[in-house]
Image (cartoon, helix red, strand yellow):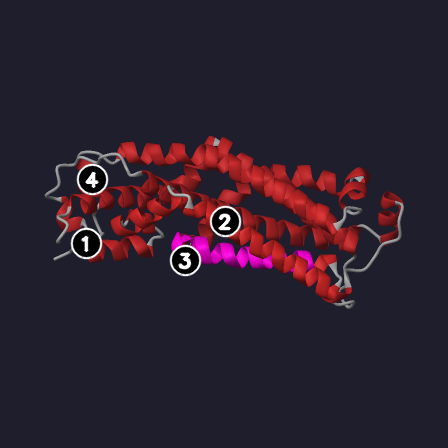
Amino acid sequence: MTGRVDLEAWFDERGLPYFVGDHADRVEQWLSSRRIVAVITLIVVVSVGAAVAVGRWLDDASTATGVGALVLLVLLYLFAGRLLRMDTILRWAFGRTFGSLGLLFPLLTRALPLLLLAVTFLFINAEVWQVAALMHRRTLGVAVLFFVGVAVVFLLARLPEEVRRVESDVQGDRLAECCAGTPAESLAVRADGSVGALPRLARVNLVLVLLFSQAIQVLLLSVGLFAFFVAFGELTIPDSTIEAWTGRPVSDLPSRLGSHVPVTNELVQVSVFLAAFSALYFTVYAVTDETYRRQFFSGLATELEQAVAVRAVYAALPADD
């Protein structure tokens, strides 16, 4: 007979670690206490200390910044990935996205035509080259992070609405229907069809599932557009034109990437800038266009409804089951 262990394994396979009571309680304790502030402070201090130490040892500010950022990311992964189980959610999102690439193309083709028209015009605009091509690498990185931050804010402002809609739909007879094909199917037929409000962390878990799924789509789009801009620039924009636009001679990519790379530094920087801008454009489009949202969430809606229904059955199980 299906028990709590089977349902918890089902949650884990679908990137829903916060649906498991014991783990959710542990995470809740961390997030509701001062320990998380202490941990984040410690991570920042260690990262800055590593950057300062490397900077003094090598006398290279760029390398020191990179090492500090790497230490920060590694420590955040150990904290968020292991304790908060973000790695479970991200692994599921990657698996689902790459397992349904055939469905991704029709979704992207709704936004790509207008997007390509807009950014291709910007790509052959001298002012864009003067801004993006002449940026310092750190400034370019900050600009990309700014675009990413705005995109995440847009998603976090809209995705909870989808979670609330799914939560309200799974009531009554829909509970047993949504549990069909899951380990909770045999238990759902005895349930009263009542789905209480999801705990805060369970709702956060569903938002993160949607956020990571959309973010991976945007990442794939950005990588594809970056490759398009590099190829288009190599084919159509000669170095003399770039020099006329920027007022400076073109330069090769940094030597650490290899001098044999036949792409100019200016072209790469403009391509990165426009790919990041395109990612922001696509994200805003995705959360505001109703047709796109219906197509995107139609694939995830069934899985989210299953998750909510199975969570209701799981919550109703006796503690010793």
Give the camera-side residue of 232 and 32: 32
Q: Earlier in the sequence, mark 1 or mark 3?
A: 1
Q: Kindly identify which residue carries mark 3.
A: 82
Q: How many numbered discs sit on the rendered protein?
A: 4
* Residue for point 52% across, 52% down: 42
Amino acid found under the numbered disc labelled 1:
Arg
Q: Position of residue 17 (x, y in %)?
A: 33, 51
Q: Earlier in the sequence, mark 4 or mark 1?
A: 1
Q: Kindly identify which residue carries mark 4.
A: 175
* Residue for point 71% across, 42% down: 120
Q: Earlier in the sequence, mark 2 or mark 4?
A: 2
Q: How many other residues sit within 10 Å of disc 3, few (<14), some (14-19) or many (≥20)? A: few
Q: Nearer the viewer, mark 1 or mark 3?
A: 3
Label 1, label 2: how many angstroms apart (C-alpha)?
A: 33 Å
Q: Nearer the viewer, mark 3 or mark 4?
A: 3
Residue 238 lies in the magenta stretch = no
Label 3, label 2: how many angstroms apart (C-alpha)?
A: 15 Å
Label 1, label 3: how many angstroms apart (C-alpha)?
A: 22 Å
